[in-house]
Each structure stands twice: as structure tokens, then as C-alpha cells.
Image: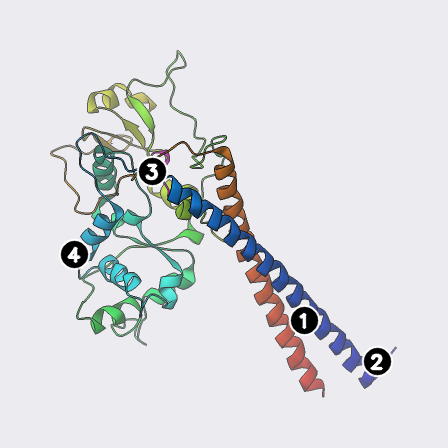
Amino acid sequence: MNLSDDDITESFKDQIKQHEDNIDFLNFQSNRLTDTVLDLQVSLGKYHSANVIKSENGNGAFHTEEETVEQILKKENSAAGIFCWIKANTQTSNLAFVKDTLGVVATLAKVESDDLSRILSEYLGLETMLAIVCSTNEGVKALEKYDTEGAVNCNGGLHGIGSSTGKKINGRFVVICLEDLRPFVGRFVDNDPQKKLAIPKPTLPNGECPPGFLDYAVNMIHLDSNRLSFLTAGGHGLRETLFYSLFSHLQVYKTRDEILLALRYINDGAVSLDGGMIKKCGIFALGSRQDVEVKFPLISGESDVPPDYIEAEDVVRKLKWETTKLAADIQREQQLLDLRKGNSISQD
């Protein structure tokens, strides 16, 4: 049976109408989710405002996130230093690579004590602490441009912004793309507001943990609520992607001596609060400890968080992920609609 030109035209019109209806429905759903997220965030913000508790570590010293950023900014000719300057500047904060970039590793987590901050920062090293973290490969591509011969184009991307402000990126710099990382496979610790990973702890024959064992490094970093609510397109958070990739099963002990006693139970390295370090099984880092210039900031305060607050943060986290998926669906429907309209015009 052959279709007439009128039948074909009518079929194109029906398909176009279907895609338009799909886009309208998806936009409605997206707007509804966005409104719900905003309402929840307002409620969470009110809780934060009413429950701010400042604390200091035992030595009375306190290292804030602002101080960490200041230390990064002092690295004027580093990619991280230029990025932090861009992010703080309202005229450049809307650039494509800024929108896709979460920040510098050192600014994405906090820890409980200065000793822990020093040893974890030293373990990762300055290059990794200054690594820029992107959500997708599009963000990575936007950071650096190349000429026809494959050389870095100093007038494009991050290099271009640096050059315009009299700064030049020296050498290579590390960029981490979250969508390319292999996330932790497993569950979270039950009812844990920080979404810590349920990694089996090392155990002695008597069922107890080795003396001095504190936890895995990946579970000893603290994520603020805005970091905790972040999800990749695949639905994974920062702890199970970025920090699991950086720390894996790195164990943390109180002392160097206790690390040595627990060697047979250490597979992926260990550090101690007094400066002991095993990079990997069988690879020891000896000598005097180095004080890394850029360190993780300390937790500014803590309070008893009610269950409904934890539940609300979890809902926000999931809704944001759903909103991201809806945006992808809308983009796909729009592409199909444009294709149908193009085919319809060619038929005419």
C-alpha cells in the first residue's frame, strides 16, 4: 500500500506534535522538581542559620576553607590558582569550564584535625591537592585548547584567561574527570548522614580491629551539604568517585608503631597521625614528614543533626540527579523534534 503525499505530511505533523508534547511534559516535570528542590534548600538553609556551632581543634588552631583558597591563590602560575581566581571573579565565573568544574581537590572536603589534614595532604602530594575536578569530559576539553599541530594554544581555555591577567601556567597540571572514574561498588553505611562507604574493616583473628586503627581515609573526610548532594550523571557522589579513587582502602592509624604491628592487615597503604606512611603494600615512605603548602581545611563545627534533616538532604540529592536526567531527556527530544521538522521541510 502506497502512502499519498498528504498521508506522509500528516504523519510528520503527528510526530512533530508528539515530540512537542513530550518536551512540554518534561519541562513541566523539571520545573516541578526544581521548585521542590528550592523549597527544601530554603528549609535546610534555615536549619543551618539556626545551628551554626564553631569549634577549634585541641591546639586552638583552625584552618578554614578560605585559608586553603588563599594558599592556592598564592600559586599564581598554577592552573589551580588561576581557576580559583576565575571562580571568585563575577565577570569570569560563568565560563563554560567553570560551570562543569566542581573545584580544586583541596577545597572539596574537610577533616577533623590538623594532624589528619597534614598527613592526608602529604599522602596525596601537592600536584594532586591542586588537581582540578570536572564533572564531564566536556569540562576537561574546555580547560585547554590546541593548535593545528597539537601544541597548547595559550590564548584559549584556562591558559587564555591566565595570559589576559599576566599569569602563565607553568608545566603540566592534573585534571580529574568524574564520569571516567570507576566508582566504589558496594553499599553505604546504614543511616550515616555523610554517606560513608561500607568497606569491611581489617580484623584480627579475635574479630577486633588492629590496635590504633581509626578508619579508612575515604571515610574520614567530611563533605559539606552542597558537596554531599552532588551526583554525577551516573548517580554517584564525590565520596564513592573522587575520594575513593584518590584514597581507595588507605587505612589511618594513631601511630607509626601501630601501623607496623598491623602490616599483615594492610593491602592498599596506611598513614598515621604522627607521620607514618606506607604508600602501597611493601612501599614505605621514610624520612622527615613534609608540610604540604596546601592542606584540607578543618570542619568548622558539628551538631546533632536530626533524622528529618538527613532525610531532606538525601531527597535533595536524589531530586537534583533526577533533574539532571530530565534535562538530558529534554535535549534528546529537542534534537528529535528538530530532525522531524527538517525532514518535514525537505518533504515539502
Name which of mark 1 and mark 4 comes first in the sequence. Answer: 1
Name which of mark 3 and mark 1 comes first in the sequence. Answer: 1
Q: Residues within 10 Å of mark 3 (few under 14, many from 20)?
A: many
Residue 215 position by quadrant: top left
Name which of mark 2 and mark 4 comes first in the sequence. Answer: 2
Residue at the limit of the structure toward the bottom, as seen here: 348
Describe residue 267's horizontal placement relative to residue 199 as left or right. left
Q: CA distance from mark 3 to mark 1?
A: 46 Å
Q: Residues within 10 Å of mark 2 (few under 14, many from 20)?
A: few
Q: Which SS class for mark 1?
A: helix
- According to the picture, the residue beneath numbered tag 4 turns out to be 74
Q: CA distance from mark 1 to mark 4?
A: 51 Å
Q: CA distance from mark 3 to mark 2?
A: 65 Å
| Front disc: 2 or 1 | 1
* Residue 3 numbered mark, or none: 2
The residue segment tinted magenta is 218-224
Residue 98 at x, y percent in the picture: 35, 63
Q: Residues within 10 Å of mark 1 (few under 14, many from 20)?
A: some
